[in-house]
Amino acid sequence: MEFYISNNNEKEGPFTLEELSAKDITPHTLVWAVGYKEWKAAKDVPELNDIIYKTPPAPPVQQPMPKTWLVESILVTLFCCLPFGIVGIINAVKVDTLYYGELYEESVYRSNQAKKWILWGFFVGLAGVLLYVFFLVFTIIFEHYS
């Protein structure tokens, strides 16, 4: 079977299958052969599948997995501020599931939420520790001078 191809709206051919394999035809290249009523995309002609798909397509772009912040959430829960840490853990455990479920934007959102709650918990805990130290020092100074 011989095929004609459309290249920049110019008819070229006829070409045998072997000759077509040397051409850079794509799945969208228009082809025609005797017996066809109209031009067809090469992807719609089964005989051309081996030629069109002789090289694998480019792999899909894989987005990097967002950071889960799970370890940090657990540490904030244990050492700083329980409520903020728990919210961080809840968001952190959703990152994996959403990422592997191909919901990338949602996994990034949950990662950012986990980070936000970790930072809130850390700074609230840090403020609590600083206040404790301040009152401890104030108490020691006050007892020393009274």
Image (tube, rainbow, N blue to C red):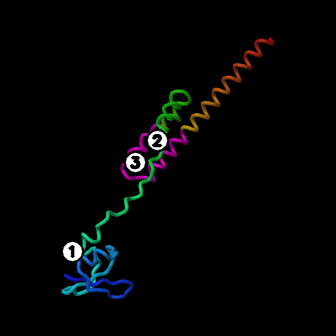
Q: Quadrant of residue 15?
A: bottom left
Q: Which image quarter is the N terminus in?
A: bottom left
What segment is highlighted magenta in the picture?
89-117
Q: Secondary structure at mark 1?
A: helix
Of pointers 1 and 3, the one earlier in the residue sequence: 1
Q: Which residue is mark 2?
A: 68
Residue 119 in the figure: left or right of residue 3 = right
Dot label at residue 131: none
Read off the residue under disc 1: 47
What residue did someone put label 3 on?
98
Q: Give the residue type that dot 3 points to.
A: Leu
Residue 129, percent from left and from top: 64, 26
- Determine whether 62 is above or below 95 in the image: below
Task: Tell me the element at label 3.
Answer: helix
Q: Quadrant of residue 119?
A: top right
For the residues bearing labels 1 and 2, Cβ distance under 8 angstroms: no
Q: CA distance from mark 2 to mark 3?
A: 11 Å
Q: Amino acid at mark 1?
A: Glu
Q: Is residue 66 above or below residue 141?
A: below
Badge nearest the viewer, 1 or 3: 1
**Reading the chain from its start, which is encountered first: label 1 or label 2?**
1
